[in-house]
Image (cartoon, coloured by chain):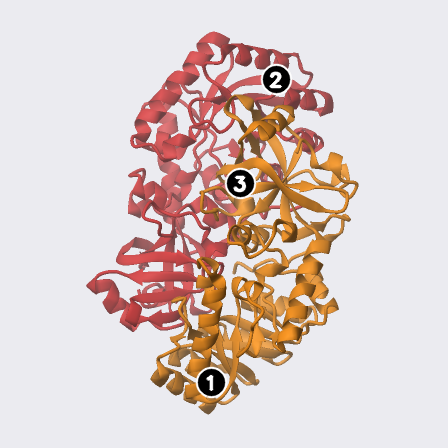
Chain colours: A orange, B red
Amino acid sequence: VSDLLATSRHLREHLIRRATLLVDERRARSNIETFVQRAANANVILRPHFKTHQSAKIAQWFGDAGVTRATVSSLGQARYFADHGWQDLTLAMGANPREVADYDDLAARIDLGLLVDHPHTIAALASGLNHPVGCWLDCDTGYGRTGVPWHDTDRLHDLVSLIEDAPNLTFRGLLTHAGHGYVAEDPANTFSQTRLRLQEAHTVLKRGLLSAGDTPGFATTRDWSGLDEARPGNFVFYDLMQLEADICTADQLACAVACPVIGVYPERQEAVIHAGAVHLSREALQDGSFGRLLGLGEIGFEGLLPGWELERLSQEHGILKAIGDQARAELVNLRPGNLVLVAPVHSCLTCEQFDCYQTLAGETLPRYHRESF
Amino acid sequence: VSDLLATSRHLREHLIRRATLLVDERRARSNIETFVQRAANANVILRPHFKTHQSAKIAQWFGDAGVTRATVSSLGQARYFADHGWQDLTLAMGANPREVADYDDLAARIDLGLLVDHPHTIAALASGLNHPVGCWLDCDTGYGRTGVPWHDTDRLHDLVSLIEDAPNLTFRGLLTHAGHGYVAEDPANTFSQTRLRLQEAHTVLKRGLLSAGDTPGFATTRDWSGLDEARPGNFVFYDLMQLEADICTADQLACAVACPVIGVYPERQEAVIHAGAVHLSREALQDGSFGRLLGLGEIGFEGLLPGWELERLSQEHGILKAIGDQARAELVNLRPGNLVLVAPVHSCLTCEQFDCYQTLAGETLPRYHRESF
């Protein structure tokens, strides 16, 4: 733990001066290939969500594995991936009437899918679009965030009719995000319920595809029957939340933040790193902690280092707690300037705090940077 | 609530398409002037922390009020403000031995203050600096994050000696951040304890200035005696955490995020905005909620809208709950594409998620953008 650089040829000393987002390419490509294979076995279209990585270079790893379609969660991400050659994108976020002109510009150059659940939004698209757009109806299968409840057949019928009557909108099908699978005791059970509920709605509508997307469901279940399309995203990197929920194993964790130690306090079994909420996000595990330490070896990331918890976070500081004899012995040897590797609680939020990844081979992979105006 | 734009001449329709960080200049300047006046009355140097706003334009509002010194929390912020003419900056974050060459470059062109609490860091500065740097000793007055405990007189003495013996380091004094004031039942009491503990350490050392910095202490107490320097930062905008702790009033809240509604669900008294953890951060109030709605009038921000809570957040979505008859009546009239104004829980973290502010007069104020490698 005392200095990650000492244990890896892959990181040159001068590269890491401050909190830096690392990706283990070997692990990420393996995670991608696993899902591509499962989708092929299930005869389901894989349209992975790119909001987790938001990097054209990492998107290419998906392309290398045969993926040609993707999902995004903002107009800016859609433009970014369109600029990098992705021709078939679904913006799986309720369409925003204020961005219709931007959607139309994008629909002029790619095959764009949008998501709706409100007559007002459909009307705004109908009046503002000059180019054809695929239109998904957001179906709430139990998460309770957005969408029409799966059993509300009158509203489903009415909204599909509005879509079908709108110029430049083509009804694609029902799209759901079963986000409650992330906190479910049994994600496989939630996934099975999600598929049944989508099929129930489809039986009523008698048309359209069925698209579902969440890593816990697809990662824990091999039976994807009843679905046409899968949109998981987090699986490219996974994270400690997924590990805590038994969705992944520690050797699938594919991104982490290298952080410089700036303070060492053996008297209270703590060290402080210059990496806080602005680097890692404030997402916490069930025990309230904000991360764990990972080992780094010759080939890449290794397992979690026992006894180390990122116990508290402020804006720029992270407070590491050493629990147990081994971690406390390591703490005594720690010095300001040493690096530690923090596995993130929620990789989607942590990666969002960085403009780029560094691979263990020293390559820089730029990320989309969110336009804030 | 239904559409902020309808209630304000200041925002032109075309400006706001997606989540946008707004600043009420009148309120922020008033917050600044209040603190400048208090520091003058207390005969204490005001060296405000710029980590909250991180904007050269907003820094100029401090300059307009007579402020010439500032505090920052990263090397990148220090370089940014130096590039914008700030000649006297303290980097109030434990110095990172990996950045010594960068500190040295900066020290060649401004009056730079650094913070230390470890012999190894002092040694790294001593061997790597070619230009003079002011060196503060980090003193822990009870927060338990970084620094030497105020009562550990042997270590205080030893570290001051190391600083005084190092070429290019000049001992400036003791610096503390009493961050426990943010969660204290009585922040004024914490502040009084902080000042007494700093003075206790000073009585032993018999040299150096005393610098303290936290908004709760300085906002709730007029008696700043015993201190030479004040480094609060959050007061420029305040936020809901400060309001919840009675540190500020609602009419001092000076930044907020305009967010487009993308879903309306009267059957469950909820609406959904396209603004989630990546826009607002996951910092929560004591009741677990992630924000409140603010009104917007002709002159600027108004009071909090009763009955509205930002109840849940995912990566890009925020779920607004309407509680009580008034909010529920407003909810029924809400449509996708309407804007709402979300007051942040912790303004330092929310502002970090944006590259710029928009003033209510339509001016764009760029922010420092953190270098992620």
Give the answer, above or below, for where A366 lies relative to A292. below
Q: Does residue A116 show up?
A: no
Q: Which residue is mark 3?
A: A276
Place residue A352 in its image quadrant: bottom right
- The number of numbered discs placed on residues in the rendered structure image is 3
Check the residue under mark 1 and report the chain it is in: A
Q: Which residue is mark 1?
A: A126
- CA–CA distance in space, label 2 to label 1: 68 Å
Place residue B34 in its image quadrant: top left
Left or right of A337? Residue A227 is left
Label 1: which secondary element: helix
Label 3: which secondary element: loop
Instruction: Provide residue A29's location: percent of width, then percent of height.
Output: 71, 60
Residue B170, numbered label: 2
In the depicted view, which residue is nearer to us: B140 or B213?
A: B140
**Residues at marks 1 and 3 touching, judged by CB atoms closer than 8 Å:** no
Q: Residue at x 39, y 83 (%)?
A: A156
Judged from this view, the residue extending furthest toward the right is: A9
Q: Does residue B332 show up?
A: yes
Which quadrant holds the N terminus of chain B? bottom left
Q: How many neighbours does mark 1 have within 10 angstroms: few (below 14), some (14-19), or many (20 or more)?
A: some
In the depicted view, which residue is nearer to us: B124 or A240?
A: A240
Q: How many neighbours does mark 3 have within 10 angstroms: few (below 14), some (14-19), or many (20 or more)?
A: many
Label 2: which secondary element: strand
Q: How many neighbours does mark 2 have within 10 angstroms: few (below 14), some (14-19), or many (20 or more)?
A: some
Q: Amino acid at mark 2?
A: Thr
Q: Amino acid at mark 1?
A: Ala
